[in-house]
Image (tube, grey):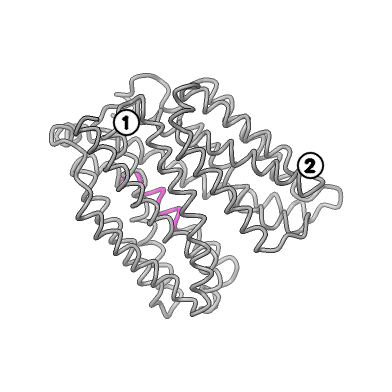
């Protein structure tokens, strides 16, 4: 093993831990924030806006953070954004009014767009043939973070509803400290100078090696719309159709996280070597579409779990190869910008998906003839068929 390879692998370990801790902090607030906001008199609509403003800020600022990381380097952007996340959580834990909660969520959303910078760091230290495997580490960190985060948040809420936010603030502060001491800069000075010359996002599309970048973005957007539609409605669907409790639903989501961590963190390198990025993307979109079509047809708990597992597998097979394809399509000096565009696409999709899913599920609840859950998941399956066509066109 060469010193450069050893350095790259150690940097990947630090990035994995950084993203994992970041996602644990994010997951901590999931079971608590709606209840916390109710203490300040927030209605259901207001709570929805409070949750949505985070993705809205990520949509706006992820490309800007990515572009900034191309200009000044990955390390300072990661460091400042994690410090901002810590301050956002601290403000949430100390908030005494609803508007302060919104300010805290806005701060957290602005600085939470750093995933694209972490992905750009991986692109800097991995050769193109190992790019999707490296991106799989981000997916594994996501999966593990969503397993441990909500569980920690639920436990800490027994002390007080503000305790999870204060713990997340401390966790992010520790994360920033570790990053400062252990993570070297990955972007060379030469590439930073090149990034200063290419100032427009349109330059990224112009310099793309082929015509696939818009198709990659479209595939990622439609896939994320369909998957976020599912996650926003799954609890209501399974509670009404199968009588599952929040605890059981939490176990299923944890299982999805485990599937994602195993596929993206354990098998992605092997899968990419055998099937290549495009084939994996096509397989993943087909499996995810099939799972969404089958989900409302589930008659037993076993068939529900099989369809849900198919959805988790399909999504896990799609995310890392798409980010790898986007990364390999542009020059090293544009990695932050193109991966920021990918994150912005996902953030926009996470705004569209839950609203669309909620409206369609409400339609099913009012309809006397429709099977509850059929409309949103079949529409989601139709959206995934668009993603399948996009994947086939890569």
Q: CA distance from mark 1 to mark 2?
A: 44 Å
Q: Is residue 305 above or below residue 125?
A: below
* Residue where numbered disc 1 is placed: 202
Q: Is residue 140 above or below residue 133?
A: below
Asked whether residue 62 is drawn in magenta, I would say: yes
Sooner in the amino-acid sequence: mark 1 or mark 2: 1
Crowd class of label 1 (few under 14; some 14 to 19; many from 20; radius 10 Å): few
Q: Residue at x 41, y 48 (%)?
A: 59
Q: Residues within 10 Å of mark 2 (few under 14, many from 20)?
A: some
Is the magenta region chiefly helix, strand or loop?
helix
- The N terminus - image quarter: top left
- Residue at 27 percent across and 41 percent down: it is 67
The one nearer the camera, 373 or 300, is: 300
Which mark, residue 236? none
On whether residue 300 falls in the magenta region, the answer is: no
Which segment is the magenta one?
54-64
Percent x, y of residue 24: 43, 58
Residue at the spot of label 2 = 297
Q: In the visual, does 263 lie left or right of 141?
A: right
Percent position (x, y) of residue 192? 17, 36
Quick check: 36 left or right of 376?
A: left
- On the image, the x and y values in percent for residue 328 come to 35, 26
SS category of the residue bearing label 1: helix
Q: Nearer the viewer, mark 1 or mark 2?
A: 2
The image shows residue 345 at horizontal and vertical percentages of 45, 41
Residue under the image location 42 percent in, 80 percent down: 96
> Which residue is the extreme one toward the right?
369
* Residue toward you, 264 or 311: 264
- Closest to the observer: 74 or 345? 74
């Amino acid at each position: 093993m060469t010193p450069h390879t050893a350095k790259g692998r150690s940097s990947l370990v630090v990035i994995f831990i950084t993203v994992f801790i970041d996602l644990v902090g994010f997951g901590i607030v999931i079971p608590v924030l709606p209840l916390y906001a109710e203490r300040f008199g927030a209605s259901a609509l207001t709570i929805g806006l409070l949750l949505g403003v985070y993705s809205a800020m990520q949509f706006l600022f992820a490309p800007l953070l990515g572009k900034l990381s191309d200009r000044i380097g990955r390390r300072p952007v990661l460091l400042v954004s994690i410090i901002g996340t810590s301050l956002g959580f601290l403000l949430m834990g100390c908030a005494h009014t609803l508007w302060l909660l919104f300010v805290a969520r806005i701060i957290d959303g602005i600085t939470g767009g750093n995933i694209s910078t972490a992905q750009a760091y991986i692109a800097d230290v991995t050769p193109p043939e190992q790019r999707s495997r490296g991106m799989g580490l981000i997916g594994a960190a996501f999966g593990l973070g969503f397993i441990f985060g909500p569980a920690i948040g639920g436990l800490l809420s027994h002390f007080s509803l503000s305790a999870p936010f204060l713990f997340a603030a401390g966790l992010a502060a520790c994360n920033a400290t570790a990053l400062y001491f252990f993570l070297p800069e990955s972007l060379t000075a030469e590439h930073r100078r090149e990034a200063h010359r290419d100032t427009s996002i349109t330059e990224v599309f112009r310099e793309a090696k082929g015509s696939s970048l818009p198709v990659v973005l479209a595939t990622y957007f439609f896939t994320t719309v369909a998957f976020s539609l599912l996650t926003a409605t799954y609890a209501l669907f399974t509670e009404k159709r199968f009588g599952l409790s929040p605890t059981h639903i939490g176990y299923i989501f944890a299982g999805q996280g485990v599937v994602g961590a195993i596929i993206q963190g354990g098998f992605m390198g092997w899968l990419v070597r055998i099937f290549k990025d495009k084939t994996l993307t096509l397989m993943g979109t087909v499996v995810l579409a099939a799972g969404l079509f089958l989900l409302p047809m589930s008659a037993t708990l076993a068939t529900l779990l099989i369809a849900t597992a198919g959805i988790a597998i399909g999504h896990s097979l799609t995310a890392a190869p798409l980010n790898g394809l986007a990364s390999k399509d542009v020059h090293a000096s544009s990695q932050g910008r193109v991966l920021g565009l990918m994150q912005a696409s996902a953030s926009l999709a996470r705004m569209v998906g839950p609203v669309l899913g909620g409206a369609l599920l409400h339609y099913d609840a009012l309809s006397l003839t429709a099977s509850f859950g059929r409309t949103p998941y079949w529409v989601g399956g139709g959206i995934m068929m668009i993603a399948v066509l996009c994947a086939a066109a890569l």
